[in-house]
Image: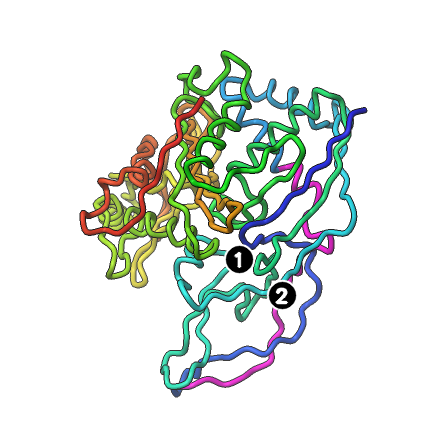
């Protein structure tokens, strides 16, 4: 059997964890309820360490199989499973491809904490990251930080503060299986990440292997290199530009779009902040003062409030919010008196769809000169995968008696249109990369 060695490196912190390891005592700062100030208290918090191997092979295989499927936009699900089994192995085909770790992985794990740009970091890393206020001198409310540690949970992340963490692997399989692996690794290298919140730039991964040429230093040459590597992943006649039909799963086709941000010299955080800037001006109903309010977000919020306040027994959806295109769950709520939760409903109301991964995949790519570039991949598909699935909702007053069609991807497409942003905006431009 043929062999292939490759390495995976992380450019941004990766939230990849092992099994829960007890509930150790931790010192936390709690704000007093009857008086200003803080007091210390020991509490039990759930602690999830990074696995001792850092990057588990089953997790890596799952990510690679996802990228393998993106190359099959017009293939039926049953055939995709068969092709995937032939390349990566399955219960039906056996172990067609084996992957083992080489040597001891080189990485450091720690709790993450961001004092600068705390809210943008939490916005893109919500779940693993939470906002926490800690005592700080004369600041009455405390200092707001983004951290992977809060009152109830502590989670380590693979750190990228020094030398980029490195994980070595060896794959063995037939030449056909290794060819499929090379394509999947190339897509992971260009667009992907591993771990929690990887579609929002966390756990951004670079692949080093003999079949992958290192990118050049200059941004202009990098764009050329990017296009050439992307163009070599399809056989003649099967390129994305040749497929005009919207797929039922996340895949490359004529409607997919790729963008590169401007190079940033302030680390991966600068790229994540660039991503956040676009989200803030398109997706946030109440953005910070330095941002403009999106008409999409305003219309969505107004419609959500009206539908959420429909009297009990007469709950109906008058308008499906466009921002649902970013994925499910989607559960807007007021701090005071209303909330609404949207979900998909299959034809005939036989089943509900409560989760849908975002079709927008963000990645941080590190250039040889140490600068970072953001890579943006949009893979629009049939949103629910099954024809005829519509959108319904549940409010505090009960479930809606009707459903409505998915509103389309206009909210995501607004991210790419620089005209969306006000003329005085200082948001950086994104360069579109044409698909093969």
Residue 3, by quadrant, is: top right
Give the residue at x 40% y 24%.
Answer: 388
13 or 399: nearer the viewer: 13
Residue 88 position within the rendered picture, expressed as x and y whole percent measured from the top left: 70, 28
**Callout 2 secondary element:** strand
Q: CA distance from mark 2 to mark 1?
A: 13 Å
Q: Position of residue 268 (x, y in %)?
A: 48, 53
Residue 344 position in % (x across, y down): 42, 36
Q: Which residue is mark 1?
A: 128
Query: Is 394 or 238 nearer to us in this picture?
Result: 238
- Up the image or down, 57 lies above or below 383; here it is below
- Which of discs 2 and 1 lies nearer the camera? The answer is 1
Number of dots carrying numbers: 2
The question of residue 47 being in magenta is answered with yes
Residue at the far bottom: name it.
35
Image quadrant for the N terminus? top right
Nearer the N terminus, badge 2 or badge 1? 2
Q: Is residue 119 visible?
A: yes
Residue 311 seen from this side: no
Nearer-the-camera pick, 40 or 260 = 260
What segment is highlighted magenta in the picture?
A: 37-62
Residue, x 70% and y 66% (percent of image)? 22
Task: Give me the disc on residue 46.
Answer: 2
Q: Is residue 38 magenta?
A: yes
């Amino acid at each position: 059997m043929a062999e292939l060695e490759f390495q995976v490196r992380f450019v941004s912190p990766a939230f990849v964890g092992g099994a829960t390891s007890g509930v150790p005592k931790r010192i936390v700062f709690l704000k007093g309820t009857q008086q200003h100030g803080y007091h210390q208290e020991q509490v039990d918090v759930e602690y999830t360490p990074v696995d001792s191997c850092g990057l588990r092979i089953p997790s890596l295989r799952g990510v690679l199989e996802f990228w393998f499927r993106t190359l099959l936009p017009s293939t039926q699900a049953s055939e995709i499973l068969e092709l995937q089994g032939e390349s990566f192995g399955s219960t039906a085909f056996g172990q067609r491809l084996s992957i083992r770790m080489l040597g001891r992985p080189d990485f450091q794990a720690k709790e993450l904490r961001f004092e600068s740009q705390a809210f943008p970091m939490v916005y893109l890393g919500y779940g693993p990251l939470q906002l926490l206020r800690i005592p700080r001198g004369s600041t009455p409310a405390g200092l707001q930080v983004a951290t992977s540690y809060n009152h109830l949970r502590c989670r380590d992340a693979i750190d990228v503060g020094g030398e980029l963490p490195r994980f070595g692997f060896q794959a063995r399989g037939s030449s056909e299986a290794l060819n499929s692996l090379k394509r999947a690794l190339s897509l992971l290298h260009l667009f992907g990440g591993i771990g929690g919140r990887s579609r929002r730039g966390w756990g951004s991964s670079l692949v080093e292997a003999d079949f992958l040429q290192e990118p050049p230093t200059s941004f202009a040459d990098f764009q050329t290199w990017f296009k050439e590597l992307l163009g070599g992943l399809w056989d003649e006649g099967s390129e994305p530009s040749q497929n005009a039909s919207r797929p039922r799963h996340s895949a490359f086709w004529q409607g997919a779009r790729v963008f590169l941000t401007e190079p940033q010299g302030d680390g991966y955080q600068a790229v994540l902040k660039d991503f956040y800037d676009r989200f803030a001006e398109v997706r946030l109903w109440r953005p910070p003062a330095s941002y403009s309010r999106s008409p999409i977000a305003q219309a969505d919020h107004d419609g959500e409030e009206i539908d959420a306040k429909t009297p009990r027994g007469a709950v109906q959806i008058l308008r499906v919010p466009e921002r649902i295109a970013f994925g499910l769950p989607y559960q807007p709520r007021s701090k005071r008196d209303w909330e609404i939760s949207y979900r998909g409903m299959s034809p005939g109301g036989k089943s509900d769809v409560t989760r849908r991964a975002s079709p927008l995949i963000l990645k941080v790519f590190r250039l040889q000169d140490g600068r970072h570039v953001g890579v943006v991949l949009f893979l629009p598909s049939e949103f629910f995968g099954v024809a005829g699935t519509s959108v319904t909702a549940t409010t505090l007053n009960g479930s809606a008696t009707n459903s409505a069609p998915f509103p389309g991807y206009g909210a995501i497409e607004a991210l790419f249109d620089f005209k969306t942003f006000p003329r005085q905006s200082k948001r950086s431009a994104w360069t579109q990369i044409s698909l093969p």
